[in-house]
Image: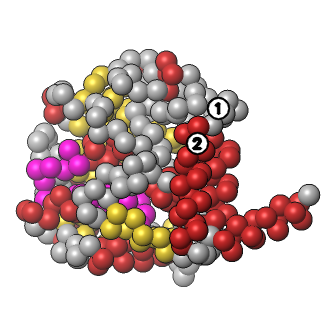
Amino acid sequence: MSGSLEKLERALNRIGQDAETREALTRLLLDFEARANYSGGSVRDDVTGPVFDALYHDAGLVRKTLQSGLVFEFPHTSKITRDFIMSKPEVPDHVWEPQTTRLLLYLSRDTRHVVIGGAYFGDQALLVAQQLAARQGVVHAFEPHEGNLNTLRHNVQLNGLTDNVKSSALGLWDEDTKLTLVGYDAYAFSAPAADADNGFATTTIDTYAEQEGITGQIGVIMIDTEGGELKGFQGAEYHLRLPAPQAPHLIFEIHRHYVDWSDGLHNTDIVKYLHSLGYVIYSVRDFHSNYAMSHLPIELVPLEETYLEGPPHGLNMVAVKDPTILQNDLFKLTHHVSPKLLWHKDPTLHHPTTS
């Protein structure tokens, strides 16, 4: 049987090299998802996703356009790219994590400098750069993965945003050192390099800001570096100690694989560190996927009321020094629910509370 499955996978790889057929089969997979009565878990992860992955394995660069006119070209390498390509509607308003994207754009609306650590192929950076372009703002995008950095730079050129994205192969840390990536693509994490001749160099946000002449001008810092978030923020302590409204707003991921939250999110090292600097922090409810959510408020959950049960997983958080900026019709405070939105899980915990 294993030989037959390998032969089937090779056949799907070959079929997927024809763009017209590949796209037609993708539409059929989406149609199946809409009609399937599947109760065993996620139909995307368990059924259609593996077929899609085989189809796109050797597809080369895939092109996808957003409603704003931004164009992305990228190879299919992860769940992020898979769910972006399989978006409904076909032309979405975001790449990944709809509510986090809306939150990032909202917090960046009045600033000229945004720092993104773990910029991937530009899934968030390009949307912010497009918004900042009208006031000559800049996204400072850090991505040490060579392949992702090259794709990011390609997409910056493709969209004419070279004046609005400054990309770097450096990693963000609390000191200048050498690290190496462990793992694959968007899910690789940083670890100490075996020797000084290997790995990638790091910098701190405070050092970088001084070198670029933007000290005190950073409005938002977003870090998603698979466990390196605390180190990244510790390297920005000068900025994080500034009072509101000078202090940057923060968006970051926290993941059970790297952070022990068994005593609650409020007792994790990263949250205690940010609390000590005067930040108020909420969990962000979101799909780790691509779903249209612009018609719904961004749901925030108090840390001590965040439901965390289930397999090890990650979630996004927002930290601000003036919580009144999150108190308007764009946001909704919810209680005792999971930040991880999943259609195939208990709706009282894992579905948006407003339809």
Q: Amino acid at mark 2?
A: Glu
Is residue 274 in sight in this rendering? no
Residues 274 and 339: in front is: 339
Residues 49 and 342: in front is: 49
Residue farthest along the left direction in this orientation: 135
Residue under circle 1? 37
Label 2 SS: helix
Which x, y percent locates residue 317?
37, 38
Look at the picture and state if 255 lies above or below 53: above
Q: Are marks 2 and 1 in contact (CB under 8 Å)?
A: no
Q: Amino acid at mark 1?
A: Asn
Q: Which residues are magenta?
A: 105-128
Residue 323 position by quadrant: top left
Residue under circle 2? 33
Determine whether, in the image, residue 194 is placed left or right of residue 296. right
Separation (CA) of disc 2 from disc 1: 8 Å
Residues 203 and 332: in front is: 332
Which x, y percent locates residue 1?
91, 58
Label 1 SS: loop
Q: Is residue 350 magenta?
A: no
Q: Circle 2: is it few (<14), some (14-19), or many (20+) Cα within 10 Å?
A: some
Q: Is residue 107 magenta?
A: yes
Residues 25 and 235: in front is: 25
Residue 73 position by quadrant: bottom left
Determine whether, in the image, residue 85 is placed left or right of residue 215. right
